[in-house]
Amino acid sequence: MNILLVEDDTTTASFIQKGLNEQGYIVDHVANGEDGLHLGLNNPYDAMIIDRMLPEMDGLSIIRMLRKQNITTPVLILSALGEVDNRVEGLKAGGDDYLVKPYAFSELHARLQALLRRVQPAQEQTVLKLADLEMDLMKRQVKRAGTLINLQPREFTLLEYLLRNTGQVVTRTMLLEKVWDYHFDPQTNVIDVHISRLRGKVDRDFDPPLLHTIRGAGYILHDPTAT
């Protein structure tokens, strides 16, 4: 699941992003309203978490402009303004839920899950497939040839990203940014270790192998038997 987080407070943003990453979500974070609007208009997200008070453009203005462009992605508004009138204004602007600060991460996550469940029937992809490999995003289950495969949260996120880019070479830099949220090379073998573990789970006992290494380029998920 891909989430847009628009939050200018670095401590709060780090708290939310870390928690969602641990739950297997891919999170794009920006710290001002203009960047948030740009990403919201130009990228497909499963949900957005938008703070109400932001530099350059406030959260409600972002939501109004998104709705004017017929973007119906569910939005969870975060705000320190908790009066009834404030919440009503946020919902009327196009927000789908309104969470008042301070809050527990468990509540934020539960509200996010509720928004995602609410819109799933209208969304195209709740299950990602390649050959006999199947990922159910709502149940957070992976099966191959009908056999349930147990993945750790990071492995799930890694496989989801590869499935969403089936047939395309995915570079190490892309994986570091989208799966680990690193915007620098940590100079570790973290990717190699996780790719090896993932390959062992989705390919070792099945045929044909689907996860391939492209030397000097990255990795690709594809079915070599497909015509």
Image: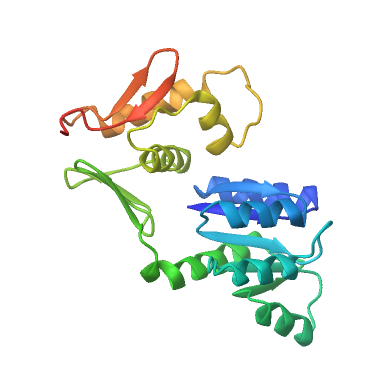
21 shown above or below 226: below
Closer to the camera in the image, 25 or 121: 121
Residue visible at 61% across and 50% down in the picture: 19
| 66 relative position to 194: left or right | right
Question: Residue 36: x, y in percent?
Answer: 69, 54
Residue visible at 48% across and 39% down in the picture: 154
14 shown above or below 69: above
Closer to the camera in the image, 80 or 218: 218
| 223 relative position to 151: left or right | left
Q: Residue furthest front?
A: 69
Question: Residue 170: x, y in percent?
Answer: 44, 29
Question: Residue 160: x, y in percent?
Answer: 40, 43
Q: How many marks?
A: 0
Residue visible at 15% across and 30% down in the picture: 225
Can you say which quadrant of the picture contains the C terminus? top left
Question: Residue 81: x, y in percent?
Answer: 81, 75
Image quadrant where residue 183 sits:
top right
Q: Residue furthest top?
A: 216
161 shown above or below 41: above
Image quadrant where residue 47 sits:
bottom right
Residue visible at 80% across and 52% down in the picture: 9
Name the colouring of the figure. Answer: rainbow
Image quadrant where residue 83 sits:
bottom right
| 142 relative position to 112: left or right | left
